[in-house]
Image (tube, rainbow, N blue to C red):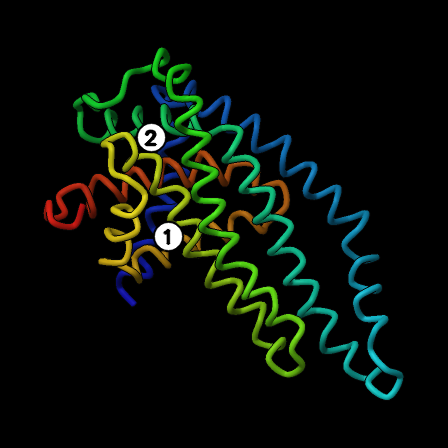
Amino acid sequence: MKDLILGFRYLREGITLMRQPGLRRYVAVPLLVSTLAFSAAIWFGIHWLGTLLDWLLGYLPGWLDWLRYLLWPLFALSGVLVVFYSFTLITNLIAAPFNGLLAEAVECHLTGRPVDEAGGWRAVVKDIVPSILSELRKLWYFVLRALPLAVLFLIPGINLAAPFVWGLFSAWMLAIEYADYPMANHHLHFAAQRQRLRSRRLLAFGFGGGSLLLTLIPVVNFIAMPASVAGATAMWVREFREAPEAAS
């Protein structure tokens, strides 16, 4: 329980860090991308989510009409989770090089030392392709696990638990997503990143759960990406940077 709370606190610290004068300029591009993407997500949710849910519930036989009142809020929660998480993947794919630069700046702010492996604005251009490939690798990791979870929504009875299972999975994926930026600045590959997060699984779930909560709140979710990158960097500096070399 202590690690869960600690993980959530790192997200709160990320919100504070992104407002620091020396870091604001690194937040600008991720914040712009996040604002545009989540504005589109909110528009999609308002205009299409209700119609989609009514269509899905239309397959219920007449004698199960009473289940609508139970299934509608569960399906609505699931729809919001899927829509906002999907747009989170898109925003991170677009802003990946700039998120790496933000993580570098936050780490320098916290430690007082530049990240030797990083390279400032010039590295942004150089790292565009590797950053996008890294995002695509995470996307593939997500798809391989999300498809079986999606089947849970189709199984009567079990689908009542599906939104909660999806929520836990989303929290884990967000922890992986945002911890990647400071870890990648130190050339930790994807498997090593997951291994370090698994060593403090509750910490990762606490951070990812906080990021998910921030993502689900309309308008507030505009700051979710830069705040999560900054918070994940603080978590890296204090909890994971000094992990045993064997873990990498």
Task: Report the quarter where the N terminus lies.
Answer: bottom left
Q: Identify whether 18 is placed above or below 202.
A: above
Q: Are marks 1 and 2 in contact (CB under 8 Å)?
A: no
Mark number displayed over residue 150:
none
Please give the residue where the numbered disc 1 appears in the rendered image: 207
Task: Name the residue type under label 2.
Answer: Ala
Q: Identify whether 146 is placed above or below 221.
A: below
Secondary-structure class at tag 1: helix
Q: Nearer the viewer, residue 127 or 202?
A: 127
- Where's residue 88, x and y in %? 55, 42
- Per the model, the C-alpha gap separating discs 1 and 2 is 16 Å
Identify the residue at horizontal 38%, vertical 21% (top origin): 127
Q: Which of the marked residues, 1 or 2, is nearer the chain's N terminus?
A: 2
Q: Identify whether 207 is placed above or below 88.
A: below
Location of residue 52 by image quarter = bottom right
Identify the residue at horizontal 30%, vertical 29% (top origin): 106
Mark number displayed over residue 103:
2
